[in-house]
Amino acid sequence: MVATSRLPKPVSEAWHWQLQAACRDVNVSRFFHPENERGPARDDREEQAKRICAACPVMRQCREHALKAREPYGIWGGLGERERRELIGRNCAA
């Protein structure tokens, strides 16, 4: 279960950056894997999502949100699930 206490307060100013996101009109299936997706199919989908993130004007805000909220799934701010877990683990150990 995601700990919602880490999420920004539900005011539009906290989420306003999302209105400028490059992924705003992209199908979410590009960023979140279907059940049992593995191997090259998953790698290809993640790389496509990360290319969208790389050109996003709010990638930094998205990444900060994902790390702070400890988003467990999907591509956020150009980072995959494993990459976020590693960064969070390093920051917790420091």
Image: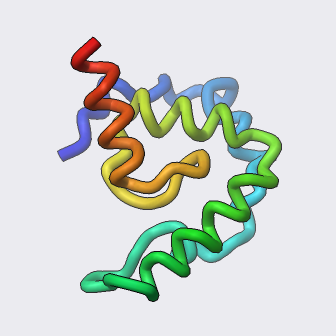
Name which residue lies at 33% across and 31% down: 88
Q: Quick check: 17 above or below 82?
A: above
Report the quarter where the C terminus lies. top left
Horizontal side, residue 78 vs residue 33: left or right:
right
Name which residue lies at 32% across and 39% down: 86
- Percent across and percent down for residue 45 are 54, 78
Horizontal side, residue 72 vs residue 77: left or right:
left
**Picture quadrant where residue 3 is located:** top left
- Percent across and percent down for residue 62 are 60, 40
> Quick one: which residue is furthest to the left in this view?
1
Q: Quick check: 31 above or below 85?
A: below
- Percent across and percent down for residue 15 are 63, 34
**Residue 3 vs residue 67, the one in the foreground:** 67
- Percent across and percent down for residue 71 are 37, 45
Horizontal side, residue 44 vs residue 90: left or right:
right
Q: Quick check: 7 above or below 32?
A: above
Colour style of the rendered protein structure = rainbow
Horizontal side, residue 75 vs residue 33: left or right:
right
**Residue 3 vs residue 55, the one in the foreground:** 55
